[in-house]
């Protein structure tokens, strides 16, 4: 079964705007439905109650559904390390939005890949968005009344990081252009999709070879011959093999991504999850909140994505093994622009965390 892989690449910022239906990480969301966007209450972290910020989005139309000619999945995360709890998903939010080919926001013809094409297609032509994070913003600065915010926490952040000096002085940059120098957000990258090439059976026997080496090593220990190994590198290699054999799921994960170690997304709708550990696999997927139908696996976010987020403290920061996104099997039409979908977070078990990084 083929899998679509996502890789992070830098590109011109204008290519990541809503009018071009991008897949991207970081910056502000490139909303699909430009009028009915989520707000603070939709996005609040279950632990600190502040809004989660945009992590990534995947443009994934449904070819067999006229109502999902355009379709995007949005993922948000709370940046606070204390809200990132082992194998818990309360700091994560996922939304699905979709539109028919004929809709009130976009022309029926494909977009023209030019920076000046239809710049009027912008969320801020429809609603007010938060200057800091880009979600629905019902509040504004009481002094200048020019800048909008989704919550008081983001207003305070902006006041301490620039707005105090510019409030009531000159008109600030329009909201949609405030992404480039916004250190509150994750850096922007385009997600480029490539098809994974399936390896030959002869290339997939690494685990069997590792198990054979492990058996040899165990026999040497029983015969008290392990100490006769003079080559320290060989000993270290055998110890690494021992750790991997303890968790065959992790070994399969490692061998699968070896061909494409920089992959940040594995898109494999309706197929199997590539788990990173045999422990805490997802066992109960909530039904769709819109239609009460079943959900299915659509894609997973890999730990390599963390390398592109410019996290200040590599120890005390958000982390995950994999993030697994489940969506409505029928891709039912959202009643209010965006449907809440389900995400499961699986963390790396302690003895393998160093290997995965």
Image (cartoon, grey):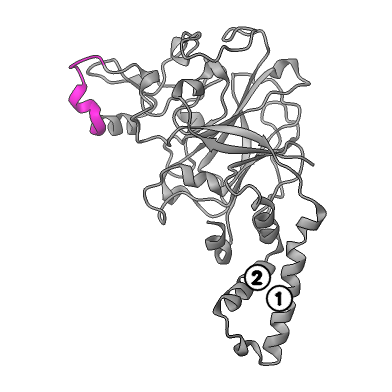
In the drawing, does residue 26 fall left or right of residue 75?
A: left
* Quadrant where the N terminus is found in the figure: top right
Q: CA distance from mark 2 to mark 1?
A: 7 Å
Residue named by callout 1 = 214
Residue 161 position in % (x across, y down): 25, 33
Q: Quadrant of residue 67?
A: top right
Residue 277 position in % (x across, y down): 65, 58
Mark 2 neighbour density, 10 Å: few (under 14) some (14–19) many (20 or more): many
Kindly identify the residue that appears in the image at 65 percent across and 51 percent down: 257
Name above or below for residue 105 compared with residue 131.
Answer: above
Residue 252 position in % (x across, y down): 70, 57
The residue at the far bottom in this view is 224
Name above or below for residue 251 compared with residue 334.
Answer: below
Q: Nearer the viewer, residue 353 or 209?
A: 209
Q: Nearer the viewer, residue 199 or 140?
A: 199
* Local SS, label 2: helix
The stretch of residues the image draws in magenta is: 160-171
Residue named by callout 2 = 241
2 and 1 marks in contact (CB < 8 Å): yes
Kindly identify the residue that appears in the image at 57 percent across and 29 percent down: 23
């Amino acid at each position: 079964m083929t899998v679509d892989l996502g890789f992070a690449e830098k590109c011109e910022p204008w290519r990541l705007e809503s009018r071009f239906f991008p897949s991207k990480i970081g910056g502000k969301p490139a909303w699909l439905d430009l009028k009915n966007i989520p707000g603070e209450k939709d996005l609040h972290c279950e632990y600190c109650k502040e809004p989660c910020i945009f992590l990534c989005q995947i443009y994934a139309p449904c070819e067999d559904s006229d109502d999902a000619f355009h379709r995007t999945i949005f993922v948000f995360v709370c940046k606070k390390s204390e809200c990132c709890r082992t194998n818990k998903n309360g700091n994560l939010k996922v939304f699905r939005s979709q539109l028919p080919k004929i809709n009130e926001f976009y022309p029926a013809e494909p977009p023209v890949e030019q920076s000046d094409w239809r710049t009027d297609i912008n969320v801020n032509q429809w609603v007010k968005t938060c200057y800091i994070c880009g979600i629905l913003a019902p509040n504004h600065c009481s002094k200048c009344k020019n800048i909008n915010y989704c919550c008081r926490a983001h207003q305070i952040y902006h006041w301490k990081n620039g707005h105090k000096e510019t409030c009531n002085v000159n008109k600030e940059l329009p909201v949609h252009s405030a992404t480039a120098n916004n250190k509150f957000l994750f850096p922007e990258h385009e997600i480029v999709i490539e098809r994974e090439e399936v390896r030959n059976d002869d290339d997939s026997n690494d685990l069997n070879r590792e198990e054979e080496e492990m058996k040899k090593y165990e026999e040497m220990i029983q015969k008290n011959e392990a100490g006769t190994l003079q080559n320290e590198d060989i000993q270290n290699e055998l110890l690494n093999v021992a750790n991997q054999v303890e968790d065959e799921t992790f070994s399969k994960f490692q061998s699968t991504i070896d061909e494409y170690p920089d992959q940040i997304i594995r898109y494999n709708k309706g197929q199997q999850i590539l788990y990173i550990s045999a422990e805490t696999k997802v066992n109960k997927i909530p039904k769709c909140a819109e239609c009460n139908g079943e959900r299915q696996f659509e894609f997973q976010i890999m730990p390599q994505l963390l390398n592109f987020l410019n996290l200040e403290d590599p120890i005390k920061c958000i982390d995950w093994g994999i993030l697994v996104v489940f969506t409505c099997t029928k891709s039912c039409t959202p009643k209010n622009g965006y449907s809440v979908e389900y995400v499961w977070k699986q963390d790396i078990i302690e003895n393998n965390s160093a290997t995965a990084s």
